[in-house]
Amino acid sequence: MEWLNIPNIDLYLVLGILFSFGAVETILGHYSNSDRRKDDWIMESIGFFVVAFTKALLVTVIYIIGSTLFPSVAGILSGWTLWLAFPFYILIDDVAQYWYHRSAHEYDWLWKHHRVHHAAKEMGILTSYRNSWVYYLIMPNLWWVGISTFLGLGMAAALGLIFKQIVVTSVHSTWKWDEVLYKYKFLHPIAWIIEHIIITPAFHHGHHGRAQDDHISDPNGNFGNTFSLWDQMFGTAKFTRQFPSVYGLQTDTLDKWTSQVFYPFIKEKQPESELSSSFKKVKNTGTEPLKTELDPGTYLYCQCGFSKDQPFCNGSHHGSKFKPMIVDINKKRKVSLCTCKLTKTPPFCDDSHLSLK
Ligand code: FES
Protein backbone atom coordinates (compact mmCIF):
# COMPACT_ATOMS: atom_id res chain seq x y z
CA MET A 1 0.00 0.00 0.00
CA GLU A 2 3.04 2.27 -0.17
CA TRP A 3 1.85 3.51 -3.56
CA LEU A 4 -1.37 4.77 -1.95
CA ASN A 5 0.58 7.72 -0.64
CA ILE A 6 -2.31 9.87 0.62
CA PRO A 7 -1.47 12.29 3.42
CA ASN A 8 -3.86 11.66 6.30
CA ILE A 9 -4.11 15.38 7.07
CA ASP A 10 -6.45 15.71 4.05
CA LEU A 11 -9.62 15.26 6.09
CA TYR A 12 -8.46 17.82 8.66
CA LEU A 13 -7.73 20.36 5.93
CA VAL A 14 -11.15 19.82 4.32
CA LEU A 15 -12.84 20.30 7.70
CA GLY A 16 -10.63 23.34 8.37
CA ILE A 17 -11.73 24.96 5.08
CA LEU A 18 -15.40 24.29 5.85
CA PHE A 19 -15.12 25.64 9.39
CA SER A 20 -13.27 28.77 8.22
CA PHE A 21 -15.91 29.69 5.66
CA GLY A 22 -18.67 28.60 8.06
CA ALA A 23 -17.27 30.92 10.74
CA VAL A 24 -17.30 33.89 8.35
CA GLU A 25 -20.87 33.09 7.25
CA THR A 26 -21.93 32.90 10.90
CA ILE A 27 -20.30 36.28 11.65
CA LEU A 28 -22.07 37.73 8.60
CA GLY A 29 -25.39 36.61 10.12
CA HIS A 30 -26.15 34.03 7.44
CA TYR A 31 -27.54 31.47 9.88
CA SER A 32 -29.43 33.79 12.22
CA ASN A 33 -31.43 35.12 9.23
CA SER A 34 -31.96 31.78 7.53
CA ASP A 35 -35.38 30.69 6.20
CA ARG A 36 -34.30 27.08 5.72
CA ARG A 37 -36.92 24.41 6.34
CA LYS A 38 -36.22 21.61 8.80
CA ASP A 39 -35.73 19.30 5.80
CA ASP A 40 -33.06 21.65 4.41
CA TRP A 41 -31.13 21.58 7.68
CA ILE A 42 -31.26 17.78 7.79
CA MET A 43 -30.14 17.38 4.16
CA GLU A 44 -27.31 19.86 4.45
CA SER A 45 -26.13 18.44 7.77
CA ILE A 46 -25.87 14.86 6.56
CA GLY A 47 -24.63 15.79 3.05
CA PHE A 48 -20.96 16.04 4.06
CA PHE A 49 -21.05 12.55 5.57
CA VAL A 50 -22.88 11.12 2.53
CA VAL A 51 -20.06 12.39 0.28
CA ALA A 52 -17.27 11.26 2.63
CA PHE A 53 -18.82 7.80 3.02
CA THR A 54 -19.34 7.39 -0.75
CA LYS A 55 -15.79 8.53 -1.50
CA ALA A 56 -14.31 6.04 0.98
CA LEU A 57 -16.57 3.29 -0.36
CA LEU A 58 -15.54 3.87 -3.99
CA VAL A 59 -11.81 4.10 -3.18
CA THR A 60 -12.09 0.78 -1.34
CA VAL A 61 -14.13 -0.90 -4.11
CA ILE A 62 -11.70 0.28 -6.79
CA TYR A 63 -8.73 -0.92 -4.72
CA ILE A 64 -10.29 -4.37 -4.31
CA ILE A 65 -11.29 -4.66 -7.98
CA GLY A 66 -8.00 -3.19 -9.21
CA SER A 67 -5.73 -5.34 -7.09
CA THR A 68 -7.74 -8.46 -7.99
CA LEU A 69 -8.09 -7.94 -11.74
CA PHE A 70 -5.19 -5.63 -12.61
CA PRO A 71 -2.50 -6.11 -9.94
CA SER A 72 0.28 -5.17 -12.35
CA VAL A 73 -0.95 -1.56 -12.73
CA ALA A 74 -1.21 -0.81 -9.00
CA GLY A 75 0.95 2.24 -8.35
CA ILE A 76 2.22 2.26 -11.93
CA LEU A 77 2.29 6.10 -12.06
CA SER A 78 3.75 6.60 -8.60
CA GLY A 79 7.05 7.73 -10.10
CA TRP A 80 5.48 10.80 -11.72
CA THR A 81 6.57 14.17 -10.42
CA LEU A 82 3.82 16.27 -8.80
CA TRP A 83 4.31 18.91 -11.53
CA LEU A 84 2.96 16.36 -13.98
CA ALA A 85 0.65 14.37 -11.74
CA PHE A 86 -1.29 17.32 -10.28
CA PRO A 87 -2.39 18.95 -13.58
CA PHE A 88 -3.10 15.51 -15.00
CA TYR A 89 -5.34 14.66 -12.04
CA ILE A 90 -7.14 17.99 -11.72
CA LEU A 91 -7.82 18.60 -15.43
CA ILE A 92 -9.34 15.15 -15.95
CA ASP A 93 -11.33 15.60 -12.76
CA ASP A 94 -12.64 19.00 -13.78
CA VAL A 95 -13.64 18.25 -17.37
CA ALA A 96 -15.43 15.10 -16.14
CA GLN A 97 -17.26 17.17 -13.53
CA TYR A 98 -18.26 19.79 -16.12
CA TRP A 99 -19.94 17.20 -18.37
CA TYR A 100 -21.47 15.27 -15.50
CA HIS A 101 -22.95 18.44 -14.01
CA ARG A 102 -24.11 19.67 -17.41
CA SER A 103 -25.74 16.27 -18.12
CA ALA A 104 -27.56 16.55 -14.80
CA HIS A 105 -29.26 19.65 -16.20
CA GLU A 106 -29.90 18.19 -19.65
CA TYR A 107 -31.14 14.65 -18.92
CA ASP A 108 -34.30 14.13 -16.92
CA TRP A 109 -33.27 10.97 -15.04
CA LEU A 110 -30.07 12.61 -13.78
CA TRP A 111 -31.78 15.94 -13.05
CA LYS A 112 -33.97 14.16 -10.49
CA HIS A 113 -30.79 13.39 -8.51
CA HIS A 114 -29.41 16.92 -8.82
CA ARG A 115 -32.56 19.06 -8.42
CA VAL A 116 -32.21 19.00 -4.63
CA HIS A 117 -29.04 21.07 -5.12
CA HIS A 118 -31.06 23.75 -6.94
CA ALA A 119 -34.02 23.62 -4.59
CA ALA A 120 -31.89 25.52 -2.06
CA LYS A 121 -33.37 29.00 -1.63
CA GLU A 122 -30.25 30.15 0.18
CA MET A 123 -26.58 29.75 -0.63
CA GLY A 124 -24.03 28.67 1.96
CA ILE A 125 -21.12 26.29 2.44
CA LEU A 126 -23.40 23.30 2.97
CA THR A 127 -25.41 23.91 -0.21
CA SER A 128 -22.66 22.12 -2.12
CA TYR A 129 -23.52 18.89 -0.26
CA ARG A 130 -27.14 18.79 -1.41
CA ASN A 131 -27.52 16.00 -3.98
CA SER A 132 -29.04 12.56 -3.95
CA TRP A 133 -26.89 9.66 -2.79
CA VAL A 134 -27.09 8.07 -6.26
CA TYR A 135 -25.75 11.32 -7.76
CA TYR A 136 -22.59 10.88 -5.70
CA LEU A 137 -22.41 7.14 -6.22
CA ILE A 138 -22.15 7.47 -10.01
CA MET A 139 -20.20 10.75 -10.01
CA PRO A 140 -17.15 10.22 -12.28
CA ASN A 141 -15.00 12.39 -10.01
CA LEU A 142 -15.38 10.13 -7.01
CA TRP A 143 -14.44 7.14 -9.19
CA TRP A 144 -11.49 9.14 -10.50
CA VAL A 145 -10.24 9.67 -6.92
CA GLY A 146 -10.17 5.88 -6.49
CA ILE A 147 -8.68 5.12 -9.92
CA SER A 148 -5.95 7.78 -9.74
CA THR A 149 -5.07 6.68 -6.21
CA PHE A 150 -4.83 3.06 -7.34
CA LEU A 151 -2.53 4.11 -10.18
CA GLY A 152 -0.19 5.78 -7.68
CA LEU A 153 -1.35 9.41 -7.93
CA GLY A 154 -2.57 9.56 -4.34
CA MET A 155 -0.63 12.72 -3.49
CA ALA A 156 -1.93 14.55 -6.59
CA ALA A 157 -5.47 13.43 -5.74
CA ALA A 158 -5.09 14.62 -2.15
CA LEU A 159 -3.81 18.05 -3.25
CA GLY A 160 -6.53 18.23 -5.91
CA LEU A 161 -9.23 17.50 -3.35
CA ILE A 162 -7.94 20.31 -1.10
CA PHE A 163 -7.76 22.78 -4.00
CA LYS A 164 -11.25 21.84 -5.17
CA GLN A 165 -12.57 22.06 -1.64
CA ILE A 166 -11.38 25.68 -1.36
CA VAL A 167 -12.94 26.67 -4.70
CA VAL A 168 -16.20 24.74 -4.32
CA THR A 169 -16.75 25.92 -0.73
CA SER A 170 -16.01 29.53 -1.62
CA VAL A 171 -18.33 29.64 -4.66
CA HIS A 172 -21.30 28.37 -2.67
CA SER A 173 -20.55 30.54 0.33
CA THR A 174 -22.45 33.72 1.20
CA TRP A 175 -19.04 35.30 1.83
CA LYS A 176 -18.67 36.94 -1.59
CA TRP A 177 -14.94 37.55 -1.58
CA ASP A 178 -14.90 38.63 -5.24
CA GLU A 179 -17.29 41.60 -4.81
CA VAL A 180 -14.40 43.91 -3.97
CA LEU A 181 -12.80 43.12 -7.34
CA TYR A 182 -15.89 44.38 -9.19
CA LYS A 183 -16.34 47.45 -7.02
CA TYR A 184 -13.13 49.28 -7.95
CA LYS A 185 -12.36 49.86 -11.60
CA PHE A 186 -8.60 49.50 -11.17
CA LEU A 187 -9.19 45.96 -9.91
CA HIS A 188 -11.22 44.91 -12.97
CA PRO A 189 -8.23 43.49 -14.89
CA ILE A 190 -7.46 41.27 -11.89
CA ALA A 191 -11.12 40.24 -11.73
CA TRP A 192 -10.99 39.38 -15.44
CA ILE A 193 -7.93 37.16 -15.02
CA ILE A 194 -9.31 35.37 -11.95
CA GLU A 195 -12.80 34.75 -13.37
CA HIS A 196 -11.32 33.40 -16.60
CA ILE A 197 -9.28 30.84 -14.65
CA ILE A 198 -11.25 29.67 -11.63
CA ILE A 199 -14.94 29.71 -10.77
CA THR A 200 -15.83 32.80 -8.73
CA PRO A 201 -18.76 33.21 -6.32
CA ALA A 202 -20.55 35.56 -8.79
CA PHE A 203 -20.14 33.06 -11.62
CA HIS A 204 -21.54 30.17 -9.60
CA HIS A 205 -24.24 32.12 -7.76
CA GLY A 206 -25.54 32.98 -11.25
CA HIS A 207 -25.95 29.24 -11.85
CA HIS A 208 -28.06 29.00 -8.68
CA GLY A 209 -30.26 32.03 -9.46
CA ARG A 210 -33.91 31.08 -9.84
CA ALA A 211 -34.39 32.11 -13.48
CA GLN A 212 -32.88 34.11 -16.32
CA ASP A 213 -35.34 37.03 -16.10
CA ASP A 214 -33.02 38.99 -13.77
CA HIS A 215 -30.36 39.08 -16.55
CA ILE A 216 -27.89 37.68 -13.98
CA SER A 217 -28.96 34.09 -13.42
CA ASP A 218 -28.40 31.21 -15.80
CA PRO A 219 -29.25 27.87 -14.21
CA ASN A 220 -28.69 26.34 -17.67
CA GLY A 221 -25.12 27.61 -17.91
CA ASN A 222 -22.01 28.17 -15.75
CA PHE A 223 -21.65 24.43 -15.11
CA GLY A 224 -17.95 24.51 -14.15
CA ASN A 225 -16.70 23.13 -10.84
CA THR A 226 -13.17 24.47 -10.35
CA PHE A 227 -12.06 26.11 -13.62
CA SER A 228 -14.22 28.27 -15.90
CA LEU A 229 -12.23 26.99 -18.89
CA TRP A 230 -14.82 24.36 -19.93
CA ASP A 231 -17.74 26.79 -19.83
CA GLN A 232 -15.77 29.18 -22.02
CA MET A 233 -14.71 26.38 -24.36
CA PHE A 234 -18.19 24.85 -24.73
CA GLY A 235 -20.18 28.11 -24.88
CA THR A 236 -21.98 27.99 -21.53
CA ALA A 237 -20.15 30.79 -19.66
CA LYS A 238 -21.99 33.90 -18.48
CA PHE A 239 -19.93 36.53 -16.65
CA THR A 240 -22.10 39.23 -15.05
CA ARG A 241 -20.11 40.07 -11.89
CA GLN A 242 -23.46 40.39 -10.12
CA PHE A 243 -25.34 38.21 -7.68
CA PRO A 244 -28.97 37.08 -8.06
CA SER A 245 -31.44 38.22 -5.43
CA VAL A 246 -33.60 35.08 -5.71
CA TYR A 247 -32.31 31.50 -5.58
CA GLY A 248 -34.03 28.14 -5.93
CA LEU A 249 -36.47 26.59 -8.40
CA GLN A 250 -39.32 28.36 -10.19
CA THR A 251 -41.72 25.66 -9.06
CA ASP A 252 -40.74 23.78 -5.95
CA THR A 253 -42.90 21.05 -4.46
CA LEU A 254 -41.01 21.23 -1.15
CA ASP A 255 -40.22 17.53 -1.11
CA LYS A 256 -39.19 15.68 2.02
CA TRP A 257 -35.45 15.25 2.65
CA THR A 258 -35.81 11.47 2.50
CA SER A 259 -37.02 11.40 -1.12
CA GLN A 260 -34.55 14.09 -2.18
CA VAL A 261 -31.57 12.18 -0.78
CA PHE A 262 -32.68 8.59 -1.38
CA TYR A 263 -34.62 8.81 -4.68
CA PRO A 264 -35.42 6.35 -6.38
CA PHE A 265 -35.37 4.08 -3.32
CA ILE A 266 -37.73 6.46 -1.53
CA LYS A 267 -40.21 8.36 -3.68
CA GLU A 268 -42.24 11.46 -2.89
CA LYS A 269 -45.92 10.93 -2.13
CA GLN A 270 -47.32 14.15 -3.60
CA PRO A 271 -48.12 13.36 -7.29
CA GLU A 272 -47.05 16.79 -8.61
CA SER A 273 -43.49 16.20 -7.40
CA GLU A 274 -40.87 15.20 -9.98
CA LEU A 275 -39.76 12.58 -7.47
CA SER A 276 -43.12 10.81 -7.25
CA SER A 277 -43.70 7.55 -9.08
CA SER A 278 -46.72 8.91 -10.96
CA PHE A 279 -45.06 12.12 -12.24
CA LYS A 280 -44.88 12.48 -16.01
CA LYS A 281 -43.65 15.43 -18.01
CA VAL A 282 -46.13 16.22 -20.75
CA LYS A 283 -46.12 18.78 -23.54
CA ASN A 284 -48.57 21.61 -23.05
CA THR A 285 -48.25 23.21 -26.48
CA GLY A 286 -51.29 24.85 -28.03
CA THR A 287 -52.76 25.25 -31.48
CA GLU A 288 -53.57 28.97 -31.29
CA PRO A 289 -51.35 31.93 -30.38
CA LEU A 290 -51.93 33.87 -27.17
CA LYS A 291 -53.04 37.36 -28.10
CA THR A 292 -52.39 39.63 -25.17
CA GLU A 293 -50.99 42.96 -24.04
CA LEU A 294 -47.67 42.93 -22.21
CA ASP A 295 -46.57 45.59 -19.73
CA PRO A 296 -42.97 46.74 -19.81
CA GLY A 297 -40.74 44.14 -18.19
CA THR A 298 -38.77 40.96 -18.77
CA TYR A 299 -40.55 37.73 -19.66
CA LEU A 300 -39.32 34.17 -20.08
CA TYR A 301 -40.82 32.52 -23.13
CA CYS A 302 -41.10 28.71 -22.87
CA GLN A 303 -39.24 26.93 -25.64
CA CYS A 304 -39.56 23.36 -24.33
CA GLY A 305 -43.35 23.13 -24.42
CA PHE A 306 -43.56 21.49 -20.96
CA SER A 307 -44.65 24.60 -19.04
CA LYS A 308 -48.18 24.63 -17.71
CA ASP A 309 -48.10 28.44 -17.88
CA GLN A 310 -47.88 28.66 -21.68
CA PRO A 311 -46.46 30.49 -23.41
CA PHE A 312 -44.32 31.42 -20.42
CA CYS A 313 -41.61 29.33 -18.74
CA ASN A 314 -42.31 27.79 -15.34
CA GLY A 315 -39.02 25.92 -14.95
CA SER A 316 -40.24 22.61 -16.38
CA HIS A 317 -37.39 22.66 -18.93
CA HIS A 318 -34.95 21.45 -16.24
CA GLY A 319 -33.78 18.00 -17.22
CA SER A 320 -33.81 18.85 -20.93
CA LYS A 321 -31.54 20.70 -23.36
CA PHE A 322 -34.04 23.54 -23.67
CA LYS A 323 -33.82 26.86 -21.91
CA PRO A 324 -36.25 29.78 -21.91
CA MET A 325 -35.92 32.78 -24.22
CA ILE A 326 -35.49 36.12 -22.46
CA VAL A 327 -37.96 38.68 -23.86
CA ASP A 328 -37.57 42.33 -22.89
CA ILE A 329 -40.62 44.53 -23.46
CA ASN A 330 -39.76 48.22 -23.26
CA LYS A 331 -43.24 49.71 -23.60
CA LYS A 332 -46.73 48.35 -23.30
CA ARG A 333 -47.65 46.52 -26.48
CA LYS A 334 -50.07 44.05 -28.00
CA VAL A 335 -48.46 40.75 -28.93
CA SER A 336 -49.38 37.43 -30.46
CA LEU A 337 -47.26 34.80 -28.72
CA CYS A 338 -46.65 31.38 -30.26
CA THR A 339 -47.89 28.42 -28.22
CA CYS A 340 -47.40 25.67 -30.83
CA LYS A 341 -43.58 26.15 -30.77
CA LEU A 342 -43.36 25.86 -34.55
CA THR A 343 -42.83 29.56 -35.20
CA LYS A 344 -39.67 30.70 -36.97
CA THR A 345 -39.86 34.06 -35.17
CA PRO A 346 -40.11 33.15 -31.47
CA PRO A 347 -41.71 34.28 -29.24
CA PHE A 348 -44.10 35.71 -31.81
CA CYS A 349 -46.62 33.82 -33.91
CA ASP A 350 -45.85 33.52 -37.64
CA ASP A 351 -48.98 31.49 -38.41
CA SER A 352 -47.07 28.20 -38.38
CA HIS A 353 -49.90 26.77 -36.24
CA LEU A 354 -52.11 26.85 -39.36
CA SER A 355 -50.10 23.85 -40.63
CA LEU A 356 -51.57 21.83 -37.73
CA LYS A 357 -55.12 22.15 -39.08
S1 FES B 1 -40.68 25.64 -19.03
FE1 FES B 1 -38.88 26.80 -19.24
S2 FES B 1 -38.45 26.73 -21.36
FE2 FES B 1 -40.28 25.56 -21.16
Image (cartoon, rainbow, N blue to C red):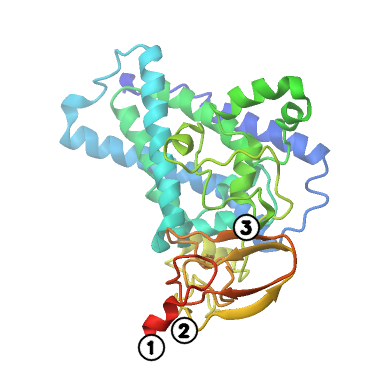
| Label 2 beta carbon less than 8 Å to ligand 1 | no
Where residue 145 appears, as percent x and y from the top left, is 38, 34
The type of residue carrying mark 3 is Ala
On residue 211, the disc is 3
Dot 1 and dot 2 residues touching (CB under 8 Å): yes
Return the x and y of residue 119 as percentages of the image width and height: 61, 59
Which of the two discs, 1 and 3, sits closer to the camera?
1
Q: Is residue 56 visible?
A: no
Q: Distance between the residues labelled 3 and 2?
A: 27 Å
Quadrant of residue 176 within the rendered picture: top right
Relative to 187, say whether 168 is above or below: below
- Check disc 3: other Cα within 10 Å, few if <14, some if 14-19, many if 20+: many
Identify which residue is drawn at 76% across, 24% down: 185
> The residue under label 2 is which amino acid type?
Thr
Residue nearest the observer in this picture, 355 or 211: 355
Residue 182 percent location from the top left of the image:
73, 30
- Comparing marks 1 and 2, which lies closer to the viewer? 1
Distance between the Cα atoms at labels 1 and 2? 9 Å
Look at 28% across and 26% down and name the residue there.
Answer: 151
Residue at (56% x, 45% y) in the render: 48
Which corner quadrant of the image does residue 183 belong to?
Answer: top right
Query: Judging from the image, what secondary structure is the residue with disc 1 in?
Result: loop
Instruction: Name the kind of residue labelled 1 in the image.
Output: Lys
Q: Is mark 3 on a helix, strand or loop?
A: loop
Quadrant housing the N terminus: top left
Which residue is labeled 1 in the image? 357
Residue at the bottom extreme of this rendering? 357
Quadrant into which the C terminus falls: bottom left
Label located before the other in sequence (3 or 2)? 3
User: Mark 2 sits on what residue?
Assistant: 287
Q: Position of residue 354 (x, y in %)?
A: 42, 83
Q: How crowded is mark 1: few (under 14 residues within 10 Å), some or many (20 or more)?
A: few
